[in-house]
Structures are given as structure tokens and as C-alpha cells.
Image (cartoon, rainbow, N blue to C red):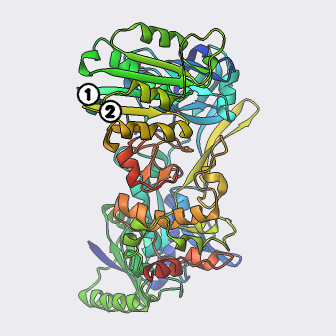
């Protein structure tokens, strides 16, 4: 019997400091054993427990795409015991992952549709996975128009800066990067994410919106999408809760009858409407 | 199903004999308490008792257990071992309510997608011998309100019924029949004994206290997450967690790491939804910020969420939470009050 609590050994292959405040880093983890890599079949939207023996585990969304074989990437903010330890380690460190866990962005449902990705702050990790998955040459023709609205408070807090430039350079992604307030060097768009969504005004016909960000951003962004004609069935988001086991047994991440770890983390607004608001 | 007769004065000897070749957990007196313990040489299994203070879930889902061990290497810390597998065992003297709790826990720990190897290993290797409640032991018993019965054999491998001068032994499962082979020859039970058992069973059912509408309140719970009733039960709660630790069906746990010099271990321990820390997030956000939300979670989990997921109430009516709550919060009253709203 496979023991789902034993972490898969991985080595930290690369660490990128994403923001000027230095508290958000992306960790590239390479599998120590080839067979573990082959077994780790995942799709965008899933998460894994990052495990550091002696410190504990932390559930983090997978930021890489399955179209990038050989490694996993996780973008992590320094916050608690495990993530602080992560921020202190160096390349070459042996750690563990448990996963993939949870459900995925509704990939099959998105096929043949226009997709609007909206992200705020550092909540762009599993959205990055989704975007890289959709624009991969094997998959791009499966999806219609791709529109992205991504914002941060200031230019230094935008993550994945190299990729943002690469996505902007493509003619098959409508990329809209914004900051609440620019600095002297900033030549891009200024404005809050909800306002930019209003200006970009993606059509709701045959379209699905996938939204992640701080609660305040989500609260003001949803009405924009309702006004554009998006139904609750066609707006998706991802929830976070405190977790331990990640497989629906330890009992703490439930929202009503659903466990965010195994029934989520991805839910449509229509699904969330049926749940209690305890998250 | 094999039905045999065990002479009253022979039972203790049979159990002690089994304990020579395998691990036997049995009720024993420990100061003022009756507790399940590993039966060692010179110890007497208790045959005449009400119920154990603790639920027997501990034997499959220990209060604390080591999940894995690790050691420091030049790269960091790496897995060194996963603890050895469980021995073949007999869990003797379980009351029918507690035996049913294993069927409920199986839903959680042995679900089709994610198997819990620690629980499944111990559960699979342990034969459960239950003692029917000829006379329901407490006024707080309410098994018949939660799909149970004082003579239920659900979750048990061998069901023993005290017939006065002998026990009727029903070997319910293949695992139970294996145990019969180990015990050796026992005389077969006749139809008269079986008929007597039916009478006793009906009488025992009648003597369990009045109905608690445990199934009926789900419809109300489906609609009333924000009802003012939820403001009325938690004020006296001390958040001590006694109800959750004594509960045969509570399965929440925490996973923590312990390090001593070069070596460390990852352990899991029972946790409690009654604690503020249970859902506290690193950011400071807590989805269940007060005891009100925690009590609603406990009640909803038992009588709605578990029903949604597994079509069973997550309560076996043992009454431990009622007996040992230091401020007399009574789950029977909560359920009954809800049914009257």
C-alpha cells in the first residue's frame, strides 16, 4: 500500500527571489528518483505539501506546468515555521513533497472556450501553471482567446517578471499587467485590478474567468464580471485553509461537507454558493 | 455463521490462552477506571463492567503515533524508517456502540482514493470481540437513536451475549471464524438459545433511553447554518476537548515534527475542533473565530457533514461526551432542541 504521508524526496535546484521585499521566492524542486517524477502526474490548480523534516509541512499551489517536465516549482511567501525555513535554505538542499493533492482548474471544461485569467499580488502561482499549460504548443489550439489581467501594489511586487515580458510579446495572449501605483521606471498600466478588468472588458460569450487574489480584490472584481455577463458557473477560484494531511482525514479544512484539500481547492462560484461561508 | 456456547467460567481462560500467542487488548480495572490494556501475564480480563472510560479507537488510531523517523545527512534531513507493521491482535470486550464506531471510521481512513496505511494495517490485523449490552449500562446510552443497537454485531468479528450461565458466541466474520479455530472446539448453540437471545435483544432495545432525533435534524441543519440557535450552546464550553478525545468517532489529528540532536520523528496526535488553534492560519485569519463556530462545526460534522459524505451519523450513542463534559453540555439535548425549532 502506498503511504500517502511519506514525502517524495526532492532537491532544491534553483531559487529565484521574486520581489523587492525579498519575502517571496520561487523554488525549483528536482525529483531525486526518476520513478517518483513519472508517478507525479498533475494538472494546473493542484497543490502539494512541501515537507521539511524537523519543521513540518506547508500546503502550496504548484506554480510550474506539467508541460515543463523534470521539476516542480512553488512560489512561497515567508510567513510561518516551514516557509521561513524554506526561505533560509540554499540550492542543493534535500527536502520533500507530498502530492499532487486536490482537484485542478477545470481544464476539460475550458477547452474550446475563451479563458480570462485574473490574478492579484502573489496569488498568480497556479494561474501561471494554467497559463503556461494553455499556451504550450501542444495545447494552445485547444483553447480560444486567452486574456490575462495581473496586478500588484507596485512594480517591485510583480512576480515572474521575465515571463510577464515573454507573455506580453506573444500575439496569442492578451496580457494586461497593472500596478496600483508605478514608480519612476514604470511605463506600464496603473490602476486596480477590478478597474482594469472593466477597461479590458472581456466578452462573456463562451468564456470562463479564473480569478485568484486577495479577498479585497476578489470582492471588487466579481461584480465587474457579473456585469460583463459571466454566470457563477463560469467563474472559478481557489480556496485556502489550514491543512495538515491534505487527503481529507485530519478534519480541519472542511467548508461544510467539502474538504478544501480533496474536494477543492478549485471551486466555481456556483459551487461556493452551495457551501457555507466558513473560509 | 457459526454459533457456539462458551461456559461462563471458561471465558477468562480462553482470553488468557489467546494472549499467550497474540496481542490481546482487554478491559481491566485501573484504580477507579475501566480501561483497555494489553493483557499481560498475571492480568485478569474484566468480564463484568459497564463500559471503558476511553473509546477503543486508540488501538487503530493511537492518541499519539510515530509516522516516520528521519536523520540528519549532509543534504538536510532524510527519511530513515517507517515504523514496523502491527502484530496480529484481538480486541476483546468492546461494547456494540464502540464496535460500530470502527465501521464509521473506516469511511474516513479507508476511503477509495486515499488509504491511511497506519489505521488500515492495525484494523486489518485485529479481530474484534464484542460484548452485547444485555442491560444497557448507563442512562446516557442512546445507541438506538443513531442506527445502533445494544445487540448490534456491526463492526465486530465475534459477538458475545451473556445468557446467564454461559455466553452465546456468534462468529460473525471470516476473521471471527479464524479466531474460533485458534480457540478450539466449542459446543454448538441450539435454537432455544437463539430464541432466548431474540427475546433479550428486544428487551435490551426497550431499556435504552428515549429517542434522540439524530437523523431527523439534518434537514434543519441543511438550511440553518446562520440560525440564532448556534448562539445558545457554546457559552459554557471551556474548549477542553474532552468530548472529542473520548468520542469513538472523532478522527481529527495534527501532524508535528520532533527533533532530538541528529534524529527526528514525524508524529500524529489527536486534535480537537474545540481548539481555537485547530483552524488558525499563519496570516492570523481564523475561519472559526469563536467557540460558537467550533461548536457548530462539531454538531454539523456529526449530524450533517458526515451524513452528506457517508450516509451515516458520526455518533454511536455511547454517551461519553455527555458523562464527562465538565460543564454538562449534552449532545442529546442539543439534537432534541434542534428538532423542536
- Compare residues A137 and B62 and report the one nearer the observer: A137
Which comes sooner in the sequence, label 1 or label 2? Answer: 1
Q: Residue at x 54, y 72 (%)?
A: B228
Query: Residue A183 or B256: which is nearer the viewer?
Result: A183
* Circle 2: element type: strand
B239 up-or-down from A227: above or below: below
Residue at 49 percent of width and 53 percent of height: A277
Quarter of the image with the C terminus of chain B in it = bottom left
Q: Residues within 10 Å of mark 2 (few under 14, many from 20)?
A: many
Task: Report in which chain the residue with disc 2 lies.
Answer: A
Give x and y (percent) for residue A69: 40, 15
Q: Crowding near pointer 1: few (<14 within 10 Å), some, many (20+)?
A: some
Residues behind callouts 1 and 2 on a single chain: yes
The N terminus of chain B appears in which quarter of the rendering?
bottom left
Q: Which residue is mark 1?
A: A113
Tell which subunit mark 1 falls on: A
- For the question of whether residue A33 can be seen, the reply is no
Left or right: B311 as drawn, with respect to A56: left
Q: Position of residue A257 (x, y in %)?
A: 42, 56
Residue at x 58% of width, y 74% of height: B321
- Depth check: give the residue in front, B258 or A110: A110
Q: Secondary structure at mark 1?
A: loop
Residue B337's x, y, as percent?
49, 81
1 and 2 marks in contact (CB < 8 Å)? yes
Residue A181, visible in the rendered structure: yes
Residue with the mark numbered 2: A208
- For marks 1 and 2, give the CA distance: 7 Å
Amino acid at each position: 500500500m502506498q503511504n500517502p504521508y511519506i514525502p517524495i524526496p526532492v532537491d532544491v535546484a534553483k531559487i529565484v527571489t521574486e520581489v523587492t521585499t525579498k519575502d517571496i521566492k520561487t523554488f525549483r524542486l528536482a525529483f531525486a528518483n526518476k520513478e517518483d517524477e513519472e508517478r507525479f502526474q498533475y494538472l494546473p490548480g493542484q497543490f502539494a505539501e512541501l515537507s521539511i523534516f524537523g519543521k513540518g509541512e506547508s500546503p502550496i499551489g504548484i506554480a510550474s506546468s506539467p508541460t515543463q517536465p523534470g521539476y516542480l516549482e512553488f512560489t512561497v511567501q515567508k510567513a510561518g515555521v516551514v516557509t521561513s525555513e524554506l526561505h533560509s535554505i540554499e540550492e542543493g538542499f534535500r527536502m520533500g513533497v507530498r502530492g499532487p493533492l486536490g482537484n485542478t482548474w477545470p481544464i476539460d471544461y475550458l477547452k474550446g472556450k475563451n479563458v480570462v485569467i485574473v490574478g492579484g499580488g502573489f496569488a498568480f502561482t497556479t494561474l501561471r501553471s494554467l497559463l503556461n499549460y494553455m499556451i504550450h504548443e501542444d495545447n494552445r489550439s485547444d483553447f480560444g482567446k486567452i486574456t490575462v489581467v495581473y496586478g500588484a501594489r507596485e512594480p517591485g511586487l510583480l512576480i515572474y517578471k521575465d515571463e510577464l515580458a515573454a507573455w506580453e510579446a506573444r500575439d496569442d495572449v492578451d496580457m494586461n499587467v497593472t500596478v496600483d501605483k508605478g514608480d519612476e521606471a514604470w511605463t506600464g498600466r496603473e490602476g486596480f485590478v477590478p478597474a482594469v478588468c472593466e477597461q479590458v472588458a472581456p466578452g462573456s460569450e463562451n468564456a470562463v474567468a479564473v480569478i485568484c487574489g486577495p479577498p479585497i480584490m476578489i470582492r471588487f472584481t466579481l461584480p465587474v464580471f457579473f456585469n460583463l455577463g459571466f454566470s457563477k458557473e463560469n467563474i472559478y477560484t481557489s480556496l485556502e485553509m489550514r491543512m495538515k494531511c491534505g487527503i481529507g482525514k485530519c478534519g480541519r479544512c472542511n467548508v461544510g461537507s467539502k474538504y478544501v484539500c480533496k474536494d477543492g481547492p478549485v471551486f466555481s462560484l456556483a459551487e461556493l454558493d452551495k457551501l457555507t461561508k466558513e473560509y | 455463521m457459526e454459533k457456539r456456547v462458551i461456559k461462563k467460567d471458561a471465558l477468562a481462560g480462553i482470553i488468557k490462552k489467546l494472549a499467550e500467542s497474540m496481542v490481546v487488548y482487554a478491559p481491566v480495572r485501573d484504580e477507579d477506571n475501566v480501561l483497555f490494556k494489553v493483557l499481560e501475564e498475571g492480568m485478569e480480563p474484566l468480564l463484568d463492567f459497564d463500559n471503558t472510560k476511553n473509546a477503543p479507537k486508540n488501538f487503530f488510531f493511537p492518541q499519539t503515533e510515530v509516522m516516520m523517523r528521519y536523520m540528519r545527512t549532509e543534504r538536510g534531513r532524510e527519511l530513515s524508517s517507517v515504523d514496523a507493521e502491527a502484530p496480529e491482535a484481538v480486541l476483546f470486550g468492546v461494547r456494540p456502540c464502540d464496535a460500530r464506531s470502527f465501521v464509521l471510521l473506516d469511511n474516513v481512513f479507508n476511503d477509495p482514493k486515499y488509504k491511511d496505511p497506519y489505521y488500515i494495517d492495525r484494523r486489518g490485523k485485529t479481530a474484534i470481540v464484542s460484548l452485547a449490552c444485555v442491560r444497557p449500562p448507563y442512562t446516557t446510552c442512546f445507541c438506538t437513536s443513531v442506527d445502533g443497537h445494544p445487540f448490534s454485531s456491526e463492526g465486530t468479528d465475534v459477538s458475545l451475549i451473556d445468557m446467564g450461565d454461559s455466553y452465546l458466541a456468534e462468529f460473525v466474520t471470516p476473521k471471527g471464524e479464524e479466531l474460533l479455530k485458534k480457540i478450539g472446539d466449542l459446543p454448538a448453540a441450539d435454537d432455544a438459545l437463539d430464541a432466548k437471545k431474540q427475546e433479550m435483544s428486544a428487551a435490551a432495545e426497550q431499556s435504552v433511553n428515549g429517542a434522540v432525533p439524530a437523523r431527523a435534524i439534518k434537514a434543519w441543519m441543511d438550511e440553518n447554518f446562520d440560525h440564532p440557535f448556534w448562539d445558545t450552546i457554546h457559552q459554557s464550553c471551556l474548549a477542553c476537548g474532552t468530548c472529542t478525545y473520548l468520542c469513538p468517532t472523532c478522527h481529527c489529528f495534527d501532524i508535528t515534527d520532533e527533533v532530538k540532536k541528529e534524529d527526528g520523528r514525524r508524529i500524529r496526535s489527536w486534535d480537537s475542533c474545540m481548539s481555537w488553534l485547530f483552524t488558525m492560519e499563519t496570516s492570523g485569519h481564523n475561519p472559526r473565530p469563536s467557540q460558537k463556530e467550533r461548536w457548530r462545526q462539531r454538531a454539523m460534522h456529526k449530524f450533517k457533514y458526515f451524513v452528506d459524505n457517508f450516509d451515516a451519523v458520526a455518533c454511536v450513542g455511547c454517551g461519553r461526551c455527555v458523562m464527562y463534559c465538565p460543564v454538562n453540555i449534552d449532545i442529546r439535548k442539543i439534537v432534541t432542541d434542534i428538532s423542536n425549532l
